[in-house]
Amino acid sequence: MRRRVAFQGELGAFSQVAARQLAGDDFIPEPKQSFEEVFVSVVNGKCHYAVIPIENTLVGSIHENYDHFLKYDLPIRGETFVRIVHNLIAPPGVKFSQLRRVYSHPVALNQCRRFFEENPQIEKTPFYDTAGSVKMVMEKGLTDAGAIASANAAQIYGGKILRKSIEDDRENFTRFFLLEKPTRGRRSGKQAERTAAKRFKTTVVFTTRNLPGALFRSLSAFALRDINLTKIESRPLRGSPWEYLFYLDFIGHVEDPACRNALNHLAELADMLRVLGCYPVG
């Protein structure tokens, strides 16, 4: 059975590229308007998987998705990284000299500042989605406008790439998670998968009391066991002003003795601890 994979944006979005890397070629893409719709579609069983961006090398973390982890019980099953290549796309027959407006997501526009500085005659116009901007320009048949999106979006909607790779920084990558609704018997499946993977990564979230040295002691649970922390992110704890949640990524499998002991140690110090996923390193 072909799996339905939900992602935010239109067909051709960078999230669809990530979905292909995580779920393979044989899947049914399910584009959604918002990140929350992506989570809900898997929770209610309408989709098998969700693919969400979690951080970008230039912009940083996508905080909304960190917040959704606490609201929806969707364990992380995998991660991948997508190189973000922004292309200038227009309807066939439209020349670069005709362009007066370019549409795209505000983040994409900001990542192409040099292009707009060199072409002041072109106005950057925010739109809700990169691929969606290509879809809109093509459907309306605009002759003085283009869009910034992936090459995949140009192919899907029949657009022509006028300029390739116009982003300011070529080291522009986005990290994506694959999420799945928990099912019975999943533990044995992950155990079998573990033997085939070289390395695993684990993501957890915890809270600790606002006391001197509390965070230091929490992180020492990993330092004492030589466990490599790859990311730490703090988010406000709703309902408790000036208190925070800490999201943590570390290299290792939850069933490794050192990792298991570190998590047990952290559980003694934390007010709340939850494992969000244990998955092969992307």
Image: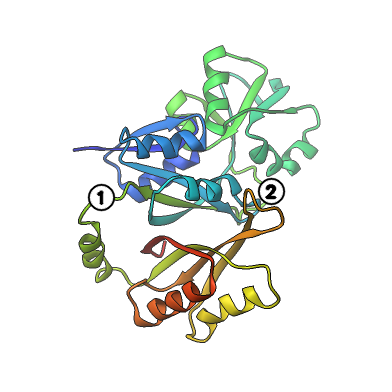
Question: Where in the figure is residue 280, as x and y percent of width and height?
Answer: 36, 64
Q: Which residue is mark 1?
A: 183
Q: Which residue is mark 2?
A: 168
Q: Is residue 17 above or below residue 230?
A: above
Q: Nearer the viewer, mark 2 or mark 1?
A: 1
Residue at the far top in the pictured view: 140
Residue displayed at 68% across by 37% down = 109
Q: Residues within 10 Å of mark 1 (few under 14, many from 20)?
A: few
State the residue in front, 163 or 135: 135
In terms of image quadrants, where is residue 118? top right
Question: Where in the figure is residue 259, as x and y percent of width and height?
Answer: 41, 77
Q: Secondary structure at mark 1?
A: loop
**Quadrant (top left/top right/bottom left/bottom right) for the C terminus:** bottom left
**Quadrant (top left/top right/bottom left/bottom right) for the N terminus:** top left
Residue displayed at 43% across by 46% down = 18
State the residue in front, 109 or 194: 194
Question: Where in the figure is residue 19, as x and y percent of width and height?
Answer: 39, 44
Q: Residues within 10 Å of mark 2 (few under 14, many from 20)?
A: some
Circles 2 and 1: CB atoms closer than 8 Å? no
State the residue in front, 198 or 99: 198
Residue type at mark 1: give it. Thr
Residue type at mark 2: give it. Asp
Q: Is residue 130 left or right of residue 82?
A: right
Is residue 257 in sight in this rendering? yes
Mark 2 or mark 1: name the one nearer the start of the chain: 2
